[in-house]
Amino acid sequence: MKLISAIFRRTDWYVTSPFGMRRHPVTGAQAMHYGTDYGTNVQKWPLYAIEDGYVHVASKSAGAGNYVWVRYPRINKSLFLCHMDSIVVKQGQAVKEGTLLGYTGTTGQSTGVHLHLGMTDIGKDNYQDPHAYEYDGGAGLPDEKLAGFKIEQIRKGSKGDSVVLWQQILLREGYSLGSWGADGDFGGMTDSATRLYQRSKGLVVDGIVGKASWISAGYVLGEYAGEGDEEAPEEESPKGILYGIDVSGWQKDSVCDTAEYDFAIVKATEGTTFTSSAYKRQMDGAIKRGKLLGVYHFASGLSAIAEAAYFVQAFAPYRGMAIPVLDYEAGATSKGREWVRQFMNEFKRITGVMPWLYTYYSVAQSQNLKGLCDELGAGFWLAQYWLPTERRGYDLLGKDPAMPCDCWQYTSEGYITGYPDRLDCNVFYGSVEDWKSYY
Ligand SMILES: [Zn+2]
């Protein structure tokens, strides 16, 4: 089957520009087109993973717009999906057949809603024509059956397309259907393979392929598109990206015990007299779970030397276990970058550790604080919220911050598994080792 039918899970697409030499639709220049463009009737269609694989890159660029590279090891192909309206997976996430990746759009250099699909071997830049590639797996049904197909509850005695699809899933999972193969007839072989499958997945072993069995395979009863698999197992964060929260006395003392995160940055102190009553308890919660840590001081704009000294006392027990951070925002920002420099240098002088600087985009911009961090060799943690307000899970929607940073706080309204209220969510652009290098 065509890869594109497996990606769209429908067949009413059309090729708008083939792979090969062509006149570029935006620049007008004669150039190689390293992919095939597919029209989607001007609509934003969902894009799905075709089989087991992982999101190698989820990002955006001026040319490609919002894009993902999804790697499929079984077939040794890496697929490049460009101009997406939005991306709903994160870099490093494991995907399987039917995992929603995002939607087609017209971001980047594009003249209308379409999907540019590129294809290489994994880890190579040998672009091949995805439209000429004969895909041997995926959604399983022949192209002409994909459109409008509804998945049914089936059992011994059932016949039809849902049975064909189910049998193909069983075959792909390694169960034998004898010489019958995927014949669309739910007989004794299919029944026993189904029961073995159900046992292996921890489902009720009844031979009835209903809601739970379909969902376990990445499909939804009554629909063809498999959007029901939000519980798709996720890989550990890959090298290069970590997700985390920052917390203070506004959150529960137990937030670090229960929420899902790679790192937590905990408020310690403010000014020269205030220490958060939740500080130690929140730190302990993260330490018990072996999580990465940061500790921050909220600047009041008093004496930079005195504030640094006060923060040092609270930080000292965690030296070598957490990144110290100066939180420079609100009233303190009227003090200007020399105040920041003084605080940072004083903290480094006493502890030997250069803290990170946290601030908002507008302040960073007007006081050139990214430049100051570069000068001091300090990590830069940027707060910039330009995504739709409420976020579920760690989710960048393919956006990047407007200025380079080591860590980006991209929302203050993230809802994370394991915590009932909104949280600040962050992404760190580095590995565990990179994080610890700031200790
Ligand atoms: Zn294209």
Image: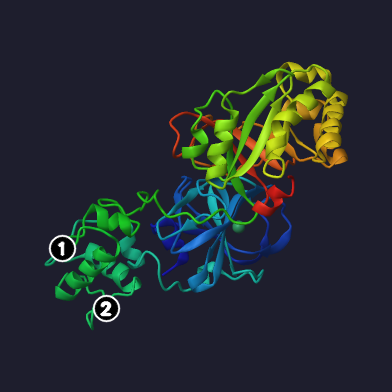
Residue 384 shown left or right of residue 394 in the figure:
right
Taking the spot 49% from the left edge, 27% from the top edge, the residue there is: 252
Dividing the image into four quarters, tell me where ligand 1 lies: bottom right
Alpha-carbon span between mark 1 and mark 2:
17 Å
Nearer the observer, 241 or 311 = 311
Please tell me the numbered disc located at residue 146.
Answer: none
Residue 235 shown left or right of residue 97 in the figure:
right
Please tell me the numbered disc located at residue 155.
Answer: 1
Taking the image as drawn, is residue 431 in sight?
A: no
Taking the spot 11% from the left edge, 67% from the top edge, the residue there is: 157
Q: To which residue does mark 2 refer?
A: 176
Which of the image's four quarters has the N terminus?
bottom left
Q: Position of residue 310 (x, y in %)?
A: 75, 24
Q: Secondary structure at mark 1?
A: loop
Q: Position of residue 258 (x, y in %)?
A: 46, 38
* Lower position in the chain sequence, tag 1 or tag 2: 1
The amino acid on which the numbered mark 1 sits, given as a three-letter code, is: Arg
Q: Which residue is situated farthest in the bottom direction here?
A: 179
Within the image, what quadrant is residue 135 found in? bottom left
Within the image, what quadrant is residue 266 found in? top right
In the displayed structure, 403 sits above or below 432; it is above
Q: Secondary structure at mark 2?
A: loop
